[in-house]
Image: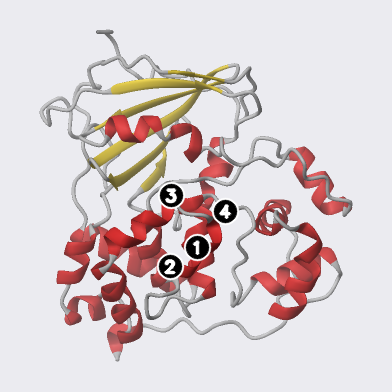
Amino acid sequence: MTAGPVWPAGAVPGPVARGRGQVVGRVTAAPAAPGAPGAPGDGWAPRESVWRARRPVDVRRTLGPLVRGHGDPAHRVTPDGVFWRVALTPEGPATLALRLSGVGEVRATAWGPGADWTLAGVPELLGSRDDPSGYAPEHPLLRDTLRLHPGVRVPRTRLVFDQLLPSVLEQKVTGQEARRSWRELVRRYGSVPPGPAPRGMRVPPPAPVVLAVPTWEWHRAGVDHQRQRTLRAAATVAARLEECVDMAFGAAAARLRVVPGIGPWTAAEVAQRALGDADAVSVGDYHIPAMVGWALVGEPLDDDGMLAVLEEHRPHRHRVVRLIELSGVSPPRRGPRMTVRDYRSF
């Protein structure tokens, strides 16, 4: 057993770590900081592991696509640079804290019944299964962005319903609407995370709880009837959807799309995050085709045009979209924007 705080003040280095590539599997326990939420009275001692990567690791940008806005109750970055994530794992809820602790080291600390499962998945969460080594784009924007962000990978959470729930909430609405619905749903129906998670964080609700949410509460959260039906249908077969983690990407996407209301866009959004699919394209997105077209060919495109331009980049099409996002390039805002609707007033 080790003594002292897990996160010493000022111990966070820069945003990218370089190392030789090892997973240190020894698990240690340490007391949570005095007075921290959930510590020590919740009974969950910290579990620790260290991942030494063979490459640069950019924790915040790799995990950025998982975060649903600045007020996301399931994710938080604290002033000391620690990235916090709470989730419901197959073994129960878990709180995870990640920080760069030295050259080539990502130190992970987890609390709760799902702590060991979560720690075992930290390398995959940070993209250990994502291999862009054979990708050498000729386009200068992609080439330069790839060079500037060597530590960014496609994450793999291994949790399908965890990513499906916010993705369905994002269907056919603005990001502002979707983030508001996500916050209200998780804060009202989520659970208090184990360990010293930052104040206000909540573990997203499991499928049975989602099934039990009454219609008027969905309405209160700004979720229309179509998305309600999709979420209920997905929650009904959530256990079968989790099997997608062990399936080939094509088979997993096909299973996701069997659920009424889940089309190519939602299946791709889930595959990118839960399965680590670097080739899944979010066809049907309101913004991505124009962004891809403007960045790569100098003019906005529709879905068909985007797919034609991205074809030469298989199996890295989602990686291309992510690189464009990281570059900051976007088309001028001249066209109409999606209207922000408040379903609670209907």
Q: Residue at x 15, y 25 (%)?
A: 40
Which residue has dot 1 on it? 251
Classify mark 3: helix, strand or loop.
helix
Q: Are marks 3 and 2 in contact (CB under 8 Å)?
A: no
Mark closest to the chain's N terminus, 1 or 3: 3
Q: Residue at x 67, y 53 (%)?
A: 319
- The CA distance from mark 3 to mark 2 is 12 Å
Which residue has dot 4 on it? 277
Residue 25 lies in quadrant: top left
Q: Are marks 3 and 4 in contact (CB under 8 Å)?
A: no
Count residues near mark 2 (Cα–Cα under 10 Å), then give few for <14, some for 14-19, many for 20+. some
Give the farthest residue toward the bottom.
Answer: 346
Q: Nearer the viewer, mark 2 or mark 4?
A: 2
Q: Nearer the viewer, mark 1 or mark 4?
A: 1
Q: Residue at x 57, y 53 (%)?
A: 277
Which residue has dot 2 on it? 255
Q: Are marks 1 and 2 in contact (CB under 8 Å)?
A: yes
- The CA distance from mark 1 to mark 3 is 10 Å
Residue 55 location (% of width, % of height): 66, 27
